[in-house]
Amino acid sequence: MTSCDISQNQLAAAKAAAEKLGLGDRAAFRQEDTLRLDGIEDEAYDLVYTSNGVHVWLNDLPSMYQNIHRILKPGGLYVMYELHPFQRPFGEGLKAVKPYDSTGPFEDETTVNFAWRIQDIVNAMLDAGVRLLHMEEIMPKPDYERPFFVKNEELINGRRPSREEVDEMYNWRKNPAAVLPEMIALAGRRAEQE
């Protein structure tokens, strides 16, 4: 098992989580650029997983997916879990902040990120040779510890909404944003023979 990230801080967090689960001695932690994966050998993995928040930082999805294809063994699986692209055009109260087809780059004083559409992700995956097996669009469900509809900064600063407040956040009749899928998951497979 190998965990790759371009950020040493993220790798340290992944290592701490693996150690907490008793997996620390079974995992390697490598600082790698997902667009290249230079230090990862070809056809080495049965499974590649990208978690929530990976795609937003990448300016070249085809390169990432070509490398995922390259490091997967023939027949290997790819699984992606990410914020649903339908969430990205909206701000608070479903106020439109950008068109769905405006993918970026979006720059501020500290970051550059992208808002890829479903078609951008799926086409990059398919063009690289990873065949789509399954897709799930995951609807919001109440999370009382980390409610989706509360900004992360507010949680960091101590905001703890009551169960009743959280239930209202997830009630689509009171919060129109709750009608949209929250997350998306895709599963694909590299062909056995190419």
Image (cartoon, helix red, strand yellow):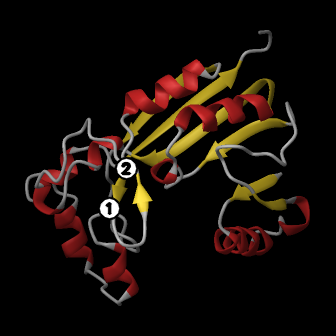
Amino acid tagged 1: Pro
SS at mark 2 in the image? loop
SS at mark 1 in the image? loop
As measured in the structure, the alpha-carbon distance from the residue carrying label 1 to the one carrying label 2 is: 32 Å
Which residue sits at x=67%, y=61%? Answer: 6
Left or right of 168? Residue 118 is: right
Q: Residue furthest top?
A: 194
Q: Nearer the viewer, residue 129 or 159?
A: 129
Disc 1 designates what residue?
A: 142
Which residue sits at x=83%, y=51%? Answer: 1
Vertical arrangement, residue 48 with respect to residue 144, above or below? above
Vertical arrangement, residue 77 with respect to residue 100, above or below? above
Q: Position of residue 113 (x, y in %)?
A: 41, 55
Q: Nearer the viewer, residue 178 or 129?
A: 129
Q: Position of residue 40 (x, y in %)?
A: 83, 45
Left or right of 28? Residue 92 is: left
Disc 2 designates what residue?
A: 105
Report if residue 41 is visible in the image: yes
